[in-house]
Image (cartoon, rainbow, N blue to C red):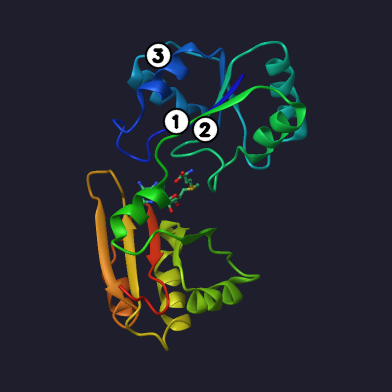
Amino acid sequence: MLSIVATPIGNLQDITLRAVETLRNCTAIACEDTRVTGMLLQHLGIEKKPLVSIHSYASDARTDQLVERLRNGEHIVLVSDAGTPGISDPGYGLVSRVQKEGLPLEVVPGPSAFLAALSASGLPMNQFVYLGFLPLKKGRSTLLRSIADEERTVVFYESVHRIRRALGDLAEALAPQPDRTVVIARELTKMYEQIITTTVEALPGVAQTITEKGEFVIVVGPRNRKD
Ligand code: SAM
């Protein structure tokens, strides 16, 4: 059996009872950084487990090995460093193979940064578009232009090194819609959690005051918001 298990995005208390139980009972864990997962196990008081690292660039051979172990009746957990595996994180390749092979699979849901940001944003979220990370070059301006036209709430991730550039580019792409809402969610569930609500017009000024530390989710309200 493969169990896909979500882990905390910051606050280590944000883990479900079922996730802890599954981590305790499995025979091995497929993870990104073995040190990160090792520390989580230690925090949960779970004895050491065999850890197999998988990355988005993981070879097919690594996936083959894990599939073989599953075929032999092992119970393997898939986690990422934080949040839900496969959401802008490795996991897709393994899960897709397990599905194709008809092997048993279950999901143990839990935190994801984009869901936490959306639910705190105060923006309409009955429909939304998740963009993952903005591309660095190819397709970046096209995608930013598509946000300008989007009538649903848009949510995306940005790394600390590129946050100011992303906010600057967003302000430029959305300049004809100065009242559109932008929410910057920083360090969710952690000690310095910040949820900043602003407008496109004020965004360049806000971007200059942003603490360039930690992790960020950006949420953009829909075009023509009616509520
Ligand atoms: N799998 C994760 C999930 O389910 O949210 C996402 C992993 S992705 C590699 C990492 C990005 O998620 C960060 O660069 C940041 O944009 C966002 N992120 C993760 N944790 C966060 C947090 N505590 N606060 C704000 N953003 C976070």
Q: Which mark is residue 75?
A: none
Q: Nearer the viewer, mark 2 or mark 3?
A: 3
Label whose residue precedes the other's in the sequence (2 or 3): 2
Q: Nearer the viewer, mark 3 or mark 1?
A: 3
* Residue sitting nearer the eye, 126 or 137: 126
Distance from disc 3 to disc 1, alpha carbons, whole Å, reads: 14 Å
Q: Is residue 220 above or below residue 106?
A: below
Q: Quadrant of residue 54?
A: top right
Residue drawn at x 39%, y 59% is 125
Q: How packed is label 2: few (under 14 Cα within 10 Å), some, or many (20 or more)?
A: some
Q: Quadrant of the C terminus?
A: bottom left
Q: Is residue 102 above or below residue 171?
A: above
Q: Is residue 209 left or right of residue 39?
A: left
Q: Quadrant of residue 62?
A: top right
Disc 2, disc 1: CB below 8 Å?
yes
Q: Quadrant of the N terminus?
A: top right
Disc 3, disc 1: CB below 8 Å?
no
Distance from disc 2 to disc 3, alpha carbons, whole Å, reads: 17 Å
Q: Label 3's element? A: loop
Q: Is residue 66 above or below residue 124?
A: above
Q: Is residue 17 visible?
A: yes
Residue drawn at x 46%, y 60% is 156
* Residue sitting nearer the eye, 63 or 123: 123
Which residue is label 2 attached to? Answer: 33
Residue 213 image offset from top left, x and y in percent:
33, 55
Q: Amino acid at mark 1?
A: Val
Q: Is residue 160 left or right of residue 63?
A: left
Which residue is label 1 attached to? Answer: 36
Which residue is label 3 attached to? Answer: 46
Q: Is mark 3 within 8 Å of ligand 1?
A: no
Q: Label 1's element? A: helix
